Image (cartoon, rainbow, N blue to C red):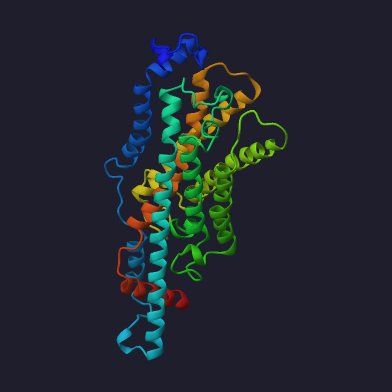
């Protein structure tokens, strides 16, 4: 940046990115303090305006809808614990314990998902500041123009940006892997819900095919992210070192793609969000109207797909053509980083939805509701 603005430092040393003489590159760097906040504002303000528009907020979650289902069936057998036998009381206590453990697991998974998102957000900051505001920095690799990825910028773990990024990505992936968040932070896929076999509508009791997909969703991409964090994609490698680059370049995009596909299935097929985005009618007979967090996730999902398509398009160009423009590499970099941040934000937003709109009743009330739902299912 100093070279662009007139202070080149050592006059005998050529600037590292001497191609910045192009008008677009110069404007890109000089006005970074303008377009960078604008980009952040668009990513934050657009979902807020869409999701918090007048009349769009629906605070009713599944817990309230579940209670209505119980109260709306006056002909069903009612639970009266005052006349229960000791065995029935013991069964009720066991059910309440299981419900309490499930709530604790949901809380734990939600916290881990939110912290994982904050780690990813923080882990990209150093690399983003360097590429945006200091393109002449010696810390940037010589082939950044041709690579244009955060893996290229943070390839050396001995540098601040490398240590921060590899640690953030690895730790966040481990946290999500151990939390099994796909079972606790997301709703069951509504078309596959059978209230006779799963009256509580818990993903844990869904059909085997959905449980296997959720297991793969929680496992495969996060293992890929762990490998991506631990195995760098180094510049100028030869021989067997190319194996590291190959593993890294396969795990990173496939893990992201797997996450995005599953998030799309969850929102579009499992929760019917795009079909009822602007409607207040019940999208399914299971969950009731959409919540603000569901709408927020869908907007973020669209933004993530746009960022991913930009990244893939620019990477396709860089793979076949020699790049001499810094703004092209920067566009590729932001496509990847914004896509990663938004992908982890989807999980964090689902976790917040599970906390805010999940279970509003006490454990004893939920035990009564769950027992009543089981009796209604067996009676029908």
Q: Residue furthest bottom?
A: 85
Rendered location of residue 108, percent (x, y): 40, 60
Please give the name of the residue rendered at 55% of the width and 22% of the height, measured from the top-left corner.
145
**Residue situated in front as seen by the camera: 254 or 246:** 246
Q: Quadrant of the N terminus?
A: top left
Q: Quadrant of residue 358?
A: bottom left
Task: Name the side, left or right, on which 51 lies relative to 269.
Answer: left
In this rendering, is residue 136 above or below 198?
Answer: above
Please give the name of the residue rendered at 45% of the width and 52% of the height, measured from the top-left corner.
271
**Residue situated in front as seen by the camera: 77 or 217:** 217
In this rendering, is residue 267 above or below 214?
Answer: above
Rendered location of residue 372, percent (x, y): 38, 75
In this rendering, is residue 357 above or below 43?
Answer: below
Rendered location of residue 149, percent (x, y): 54, 31
**Residue situated in front as seen by the camera: 58 or 177:** 177
Please give the name of the residue rendered at 60% of the width and 24% of the height, measured from the top-left corner.
318
Please give the name of the residue rendered at 46% of the width and 26% of the height, measured from the top-left corner.
131
Q: Residue furthest right?
A: 239
Q: How many marks?
A: 0
Please indicate, yes or no, whether residue 301 appears anywhere in the rendered image.
Answer: no
Rendered location of residue 90, percent (x, y): 39, 85
């Amino acid at each position: 940046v100093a070279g662009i603005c007139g202070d080149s430092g050592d006059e005998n040393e050529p600037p590292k990115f001497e191609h910045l003489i192009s008008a677009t590159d110069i404007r890109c760097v000089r006005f970074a303090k303008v377009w960078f906040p604008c980009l952040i504002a668009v990513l934050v303000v657009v979902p807020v305006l869409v999701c918090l528009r007048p009349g769009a907020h629906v605070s009713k979650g599944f817990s309230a809808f579940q209670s209505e289902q119980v109260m709306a069936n006056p002909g069903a057998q009612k639970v009266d614990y005052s006349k229960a036998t000791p065995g029935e009381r013991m069964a009720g206590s066991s059910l309440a314990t299981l419900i309490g453990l499930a709530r604790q697991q949901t809380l734990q998974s939600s916290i881990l998902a939110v912290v994982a998102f904050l780690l990813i957000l923080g882990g990209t900051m150093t690399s983003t500041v360097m590429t945006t505001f200091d393109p002449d920095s010696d810390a940037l690799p010589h082939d950044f123009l041709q690579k244009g990825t955060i893996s290229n910028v943070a390839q050396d773990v001995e540098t601040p940006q490398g240590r921060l990024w590899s640690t953030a990505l690895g730790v966040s992936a481990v946290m999500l892997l151990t939390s099994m968040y796909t079972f606790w932070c997301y709703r069951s896929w509504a078309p596959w819900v059978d209230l006779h076999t799963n009256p509580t509508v818990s993903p844990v009791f869904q059909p085997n095919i959905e449980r296997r997909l959720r297991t793969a969703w929680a496992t495969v991409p996060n293992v890929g992210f762990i490998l991506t964090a631990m195995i760098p994609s180094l510049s100028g490698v030869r021989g067997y070192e190319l194996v590291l680059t190959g593993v890294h370049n396969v795990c990173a995009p496939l893990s992201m793609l797997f996450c995005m596909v599953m998030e799309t299935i969850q929102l579009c097929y499992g929760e019917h969000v795009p079909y009822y985005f602007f409607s207040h009618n019940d999208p399914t007979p299971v969950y009731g109207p959409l919540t603000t967090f569901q709408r927020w996730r869908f907007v973020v999902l669209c933004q993530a797909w746009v960022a991913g398509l930009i990244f893939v398009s620019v990477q396709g160009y860089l793979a076949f053509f020699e790049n001499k423009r810094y703004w092209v590499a920067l566009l590729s970099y932001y496509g990847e980083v914004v896509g990663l941040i938004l992908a982890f934000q989807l999980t964090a937003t689902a976790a917040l939805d599970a906390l805010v709109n999940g279970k509003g009743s006490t454990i004893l009330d939920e035990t009564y509701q769950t027992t009543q739902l089981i009796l209604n299912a067996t009676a029908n």
